[in-house]
Every structure is written in C-alpha cells, then in structure tokens.
Image (cartoon, rainbow, N blue to C red):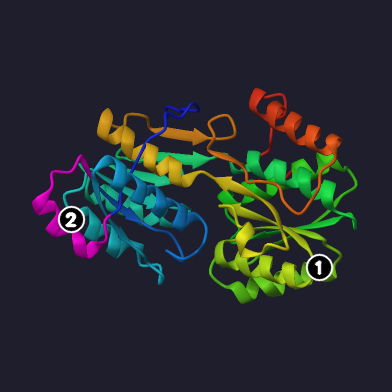
Amino acid sequence: MKRITGFIFLAVALVLPGCTAQQSAQTEFSAKVGIMLSDTGLGDGSFNDRAFDGLVRARDELNILFDYREAPEGNYLEHLKDLSEKDYDLIIGLGFSVQEALEEVAAEYPDQQYVLIDGVSEAENIISLTFKDHEGSYLIGTIAAFASESGVIGFIGGVDAPVINRFEAGFRAGAEMADPDIKIISDYAGNFGDAELGRTIADKQIKQGADFIYPAAGFTGTGAILEAQDQGIYTAGVDTDQFYTAEQSVVTSMVKNIDTTVFNLVQQLTEEGLSAEQYELGLAENGVGLAEIRLLQLDQSGQDLITETKKNIISGEIEVPESVQ
C-alpha cells in the first residue's frame, strides 16, 4: 500500500439533511459529500464535533453540499447504505468503530469512493487516513511527568483498540523519558459514551495517587476530566482543546486537527481529486499537536524540554512507540 506522510491539506462541507434537496435544485455544487459520524455523534465536544466543523467550513468556503448520519445504537451499516444510495462524490467514515460496516458497504458499492478516518483498510475504494496520536501523546506524557508531584499519573482509554493503544504508548514513553521513575496507572472503560463511568475510573485512579490523568475516551473521558477537576487534579484533553470543559483542571490537550484535515481532504477532492491510498498525519504535518498550556507554569527548562522533544520527534531522533512496550 502506498503511504503518504507529507499530507497535502484537503477539504469537506456540510448541509443539514432537510436542506439538501432544495439547495441542490438551486445551486451547482463543487462536490457532494456524505459522512458517517462515530460513536456518540454530535455533541461529544471532541472528534465528531471537530470533523463537523471542518465540513461546515467547507460548505461555506468551497460550495460543497454534504449530508451526515449519526448511529448512537451502532447501526452504521444501515446509514452507510443509505448514504451510498445517494449521488455523492465521497463518503467519509469517521472513526475506527465504523470500519467494519464501511468495508462491507464498500464491497457492495465498488464504484463509490470512501475515506476511513482513524483506521487502515485494504479495500480498493477506501482511502485510509490516520493520525500519529502517539506523537502528540508523547508530549502530553512529558508534561504530565513534569507536573506530577506524587510521581503517579493515569491514563484512561475508551476501548482497548490499536488506535487508543497508540495514545497510551506515546503517553507512557513521554512520561518515562521525563521521569524514569514515574508510575503510570492505566484503565480501559470499554465505552466512549458514559461520563459517569469516566468519573468512577478517575476517582479510582486518584485514590491510587494519580495527580494527572490523560483520558482518550470521548464523552467517558469528559466525565473523568470533570471528576478530576472536582478533586483538584490536573488533566489533559484529547482531540480538541478541552480547557473550557474544566478550566481548573485541563492543563493542555492533544489536539487532532480533524477539522482542518476534513476541510483539506475535500478541498483536494474538488481541485485535483484523491489519489493516495493512505495518509498519515503527525507533528510534522500539523495533524496533531498541543493546545495552549495553561494552569501549569513551566520554567525555562520545562519549556525547552517540550520544544526540544517536539523537534526531535519531527526529525526522527525520537522514535515514538505505537504500542505499549
């Protein structure tokens, strides 16, 4: 499979379902796009919402028509088939949880072009787009170890899957680089949509001594962040800048620039078409990065460590693991 590491930024656009037919009759669009959102859908304050923002921007700037589907019950197959019956230039499956259904539908509609975000597929009509979550998470781990006074930090994963394992692997490696004696507690919730479960796991980790928690767990992670704030513990957000979720707890966030990525994806679609089989976006491609560091005052040595670490990851001097060693 051809692998592209230097990503040429692309673009998408979004139109609410009730408006599509009327607008289509009045306007000639540069492209028509459908998207299947993942897990909890809109309102997650994270992955889905940022992808949606990218589509809205594409609609406004690129004259693209789009439609979207949510599947809170996990019935991706039904919605993907519905989208595939429409005349779309591209259909996006957002998140690894959509992959199985997307591949089944792609086999039924071999002439339809699909993109899978956050997963890798071998299907000929599916373009894979992944993020180097481990690179951004390495920086979070470095900050967590620097901030911890107890010498204990925590990781909470949504489900035990390769994508989420990358978050943990990078987080662990970065923390252990900054403090070889750091203790890291890890728990997997098995759920991305249960805030109360997130609170429960965060409370357990805090009772074990954790004073910094990094949840990669969607809405479950939001619950963990809120519990940490209630107990005066530092956290890091994920996918989007989650500072405003808990302004007394979130030090920074490992952001996936999914909004820009989706926008740029569709922009490339409209201008020259999509040709690569796989895109991989990391720190070098601005696919992942850190939100502003707040609450925690890094001294000069701390600031220099973060800057130098990022530089060394981009240059390849630091090879960030993608699985827990």
Marks 1,2: beta carbons within 8 A: no
Dot 2: what SS? Answer: loop
In the image, is 13 to the left or to the right of 237? left
What's the CA distance linking mark 1 and mark 2? 49 Å
Find residue 64 and report its horizontal and vertical position in percent. 24, 45
Depth order, front residue of 216/58: 58
Name which residue type carries label 2: Glu
Which quarter of the image is occupied by the C terminus? top right
Whether residue 76 is situated above or below residue 167 in the rendered picture: below
Label 2 CA crowd tier, 10 Å (few <14, some 14–19, many 20+): few
Q: What stretch is highlighted in magenta?
A: 15-32
The stretch drawn in magenta includes residue 26: yes
Residue 312 seen anywhere in this rendered image of the structure: yes
State the residue at coordinates (49%, 55%): 47
Q: Which residue lies furthest to the left in this view?
A: 25
Query: What type is the residue that disc 1 sits on?
Result: Ile
Q: Can residue 122 be seen in this view?
A: no
The residue under the point 74% across, 73% down is 230
Q: What element carries label 1?
A: helix
Depth check, front residue: 275 or 323? 275
Residue drawn at 45 percent across, 57 percent down: 49
Q: For marks 1 and 2, give the one nearer the viewer.
A: 1
Name the side, left or right, on which 18 lies relative to 159. Answer: left
| Residue 58 point in image, percent of width and height | 32, 44
Q: In this view, does 54 lie above or below 16?
A: above
Q: x and y percent of residue 150 in the render?
A: 90, 58
Quarter of the figure with residue 286: top right
**Rendering coords of residue 245 (x, y %):** 61, 64
Is 228 rendered above or below residue 23?
Answer: below
Q: Name the residue under label 1.
A: 206
Indicate whether residue 276 is drawn in magenta.
no
Residue corresponding to mark 2: 85
